[in-house]
């Protein structure tokens, strides 16, 4: 019987790591503090709860997130399998019914014969081989234990989630269904603004009262989860060139692009709930109701969840971790998930995959094959462990961290697709070793 491995945290990364270990016949003890204790951002007792959004971003191979998902699919990812089984229509993106997705992951983990679930808070780093995937909201006691272990300085940023409204409360006389540029199927509800409506919304948003968040500074907000009010304060037109961009979404009533437009994305398979895309916020709840109800299509919206904001914590990984997410000073310990500085659901899953597989291979007396920068999975692991990165910040996967082709191809989309094809060939060649 192989030695057991401890995994701390049953989020995306922890569940993926536990699954990869268990699939290789390694006994796993998976520790999860829910339902006994919840973080401020979590509400469900299920594993792999999606907090910020229900979208895993683009599913196309011309997009780095699409490539990373396809690599993980081919490598037998639990998270991607459950996401594909519980997807909701979202044009060219992979979005999921978040509750059904979390239930599916939970059932798979609980029913695996090689995984033992241990409920309750972990207050110190366990003995033996361990994968710590406790998330960016790691409890204070475990945070202190990790800090004592690694020394040095933790970094931090702030993360936010968007409100969710009921579909039946959306005023469809003031909205229309379309996907940008007609791409994929028409899965988004679009809420247009006239210039006058946008003026009023922008003024209300930039002066609305925020909920108190200890130590909050705009400069420490991660760009990928920028609260909409912080985005708005950067300039009158900032949202019109970003989250409220109207280009490619002509209003069927006029045949022209509106002045600005907010997109709503389906949040569950039944289509009864919709997420305000890009509207993560930490305004007071009453202010959220007041300000977002100024959008004509949401004038009577029923909010089933308001936006929340919380501190996320991550390691100075280039100084601490290697490319298998192992702690250089004590390689029996691996980290996975957002704590390592990977940003995003799929990126967290990727880190859990690598940490789980690398640990399993070590237990089995084998060597982890090199996932280099020709693959998205490898490039992400090499980025977070690159000691030449001076000011480390959380990173979404992107083609900039993958090796270039070495020859020119006309067109960005065509070039990225060719990089993806090369990556998938590499993944296929390594599958037997992983």
Image (tube, rainbow, N blue to C red):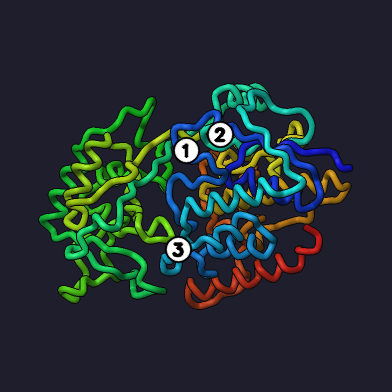
Instruction: Tell me residue 28's x, y (percent).
Output: 75, 41
- The Cα–Cα distance between marks 1 and 2, rounded to whole angstroms, is 9 Å
The residue carrying pointer 2 sits among few (fewer than 14), some (14 to 19) or many (20 or more) residues within 10 Å by Cα, namely some
Q: Quadrant of residue 320?
A: top right
Residue hosting label 1: 42
In front: 41, or 254?
41
Looking at the image, tell me whether mark 1 or mark 2 is earlier in sequence order: 2
Residue 47 placement, left or right of 385: left
Q: Which mark is residue 34?
A: 2
Residue at far left of view: 196
- Which residue occupies 43% across, 60% down? 269
| Helix, strand or loop for disc 2 | loop
- The Cα–Cα distance between marks 2 and 3, rounded to whole angstroms, is 27 Å
Instruction: Tell me residue 99's x, y (percent).
Output: 48, 50
Looking at the image, tell me whether mark 3 or mark 1 is earlier in sequence order: 1
Please say whether residue 399 is visible from this viewpoint.
no
- Which residue occupies 36% across, 29% down? 213
Quarter placement of the C terminus: bottom right
Please say whether residue 39 is visible from this viewpoint.
yes
Q: Quadrant of residue 121?
A: top right
- The Cα–Cα distance between marks 3 and 1, rounded to whole angstroms, is 22 Å
Residue hosting label 3: 88
The residue carrying pointer 3 sits among few (fewer than 14), some (14 to 19) or many (20 or more) residues within 10 Å by Cα, namely many
In front: 47, or 365?
47
- Which residue occupies 72% across, 28% down? 126
| Helix, strand or loop for disc 3 | strand
Task: For the residues labelled 1 and 2, say whether their Cβ atoms are less than 8 Å apart.
Answer: yes
Instruction: Tell me residue 226's x, y (percent).
Output: 37, 45
């Amino acid at each position: 019987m192989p030695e057991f491995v401890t995994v701390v945290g049953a989020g995306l990364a922890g569940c993926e790591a536990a699954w990869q270990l268990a699939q290789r016949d390694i006994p796993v003890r998976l520790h999860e503090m829910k339902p006994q204790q919840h973080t401020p951002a979590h509400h469900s007792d299920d594993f792999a709860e999606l907090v910020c959004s229900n979208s895993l971003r683009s599913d196309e191979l011309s997009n780095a997130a699409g490539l990373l998902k396809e690599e993980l699919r081919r490598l037998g990812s639990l998270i991607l399998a459950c996401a594909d089984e519980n997807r909701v229509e979202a044009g060219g993106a992979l979005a999921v019914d978040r509750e059904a997705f979390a239930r599916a992951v939970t059932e798979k983990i609980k029913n695996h014969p090689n995984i033992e679930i241990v409920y309750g808070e972990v207050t110190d780093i366990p003995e033996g081989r361990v994968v710590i995937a406790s998330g960016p909201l790691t409890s204070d006691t475990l945070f202190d234990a990790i800090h004592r272990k690694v020394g040095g300085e933790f970094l931090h940023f702030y993360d936010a989630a968007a409100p969710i409204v009921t579909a039946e409360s959306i005023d469809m006389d003031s909205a229309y269904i379309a996907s940008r540029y007609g791409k994929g199927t028409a899965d988004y509800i679009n809420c247009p603004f006239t210039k006058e409506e946008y003026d009023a919304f922008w003024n209300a948003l930039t002066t609305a009262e925020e909920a108190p968040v200890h130590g909050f500074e705009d400069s420490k907000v991660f760009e990928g989860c920028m609260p909409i009010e912080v985005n708005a304060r950067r300039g009158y037109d900032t949202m019109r060139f970003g989250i409220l961009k109207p280009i490619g979404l002509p209003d069927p009533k006029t045949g022209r692009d509106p002045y600005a437009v907010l997109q709503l994305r389906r949040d569950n398979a039944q289509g009864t709930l919709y997420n305000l895309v890009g509207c993560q916020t930490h305004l007071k709840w009453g202010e959220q109701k007041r300000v977002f109800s100024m959008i004509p299509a949401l004038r009577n919206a029923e909010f089933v969840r308001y936006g929340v904001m919380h501190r996320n914590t991550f390691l100075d990984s280039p100084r601490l971790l290697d490319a298998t997410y192992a702690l250089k000073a004590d390689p029996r310990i691996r980290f996975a998930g957002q704590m390592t500085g990977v940003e995003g659901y799929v990126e967290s899953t990727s880190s859990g995959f690598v940490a789980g597989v690398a640990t399993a291979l070590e237990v089995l007396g084998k060597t982890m094959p090199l996932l280099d920068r020709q693959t998205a999975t490898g490039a992400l692991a090499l980025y977070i462990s690159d000691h030449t990165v001076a000011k480390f910040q959380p990173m979404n996967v992107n083609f900039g961290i993958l090796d270039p082709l070495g020859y020119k191809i006309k067109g960005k989309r065509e070039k990225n697709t060719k990089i993806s094809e090369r990556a998938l060939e590499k993944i296929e060649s390594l599958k037997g070793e992983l």
